[in-house]
Image: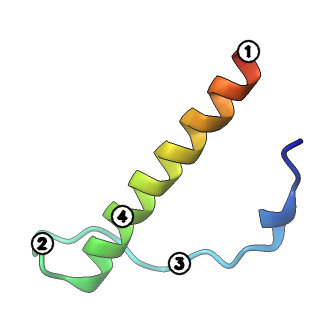
């Protein structure tokens, strides 16, 4: 069962910048990788 535990999560104010060494850019890119992984996991669980 997938709950709504993240409904009160704090959103970040970071964005991707042209500078790849920027901490905000790195955080956003890693967060996107994590989100895509979780999204794919949920999608696989729903299709089974």
Res 9 label: none
Tag in front: 4 or 3:
4
Q: Secondary structure at mark 4?
A: helix
Task: Find residue 20 and name its label.
Answer: 2
Horizontally, is 5 left or right of 38 in the view?
right
Q: Earlier in the sequence, mark 4 or mark 3?
A: 3
Q: Which residue is mark 3?
A: 12
Q: Which residue is mark 4?
A: 30
Residue most extreme to the top: 48
**Where the C terminus falls, by quadrant?**
top right
Numbered disc 3: secondary structure: loop
Indicate the position of residue 16 as horizontal and vertical percent values.
27, 68
Give the Cα distance between marks 2 and 4.
12 Å
**Residue at image coords 60%, 36%:** 41
Query: Which circle's residue, 2 or 3, is located before the other in the chain?
Result: 3
Q: Quadrant of the N terminus?
A: top right
Cβ–Cβ under 8 Å for marks 4 and 1: no
For marks 2 and 3, give the CA distance. Answer: 18 Å
Compare marks 1 and 3 and give the one earlier in the sequence: 3
Horizontal and vertical percent for residue 32? 42, 55
| Residue mark closest to the camera, 4 vs 1 | 1
């Amino acid at each position: 069962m997938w709950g709504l535990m993240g409904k009160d999560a704090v959103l970040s104010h970071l964005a991707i910048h042209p500078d790849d060494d920027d901490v905000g850019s790195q955080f956003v890119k890693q967060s996107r990788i994590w989100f895509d992984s979780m999204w794919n996991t949920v999608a696989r669980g729903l299709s089974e």
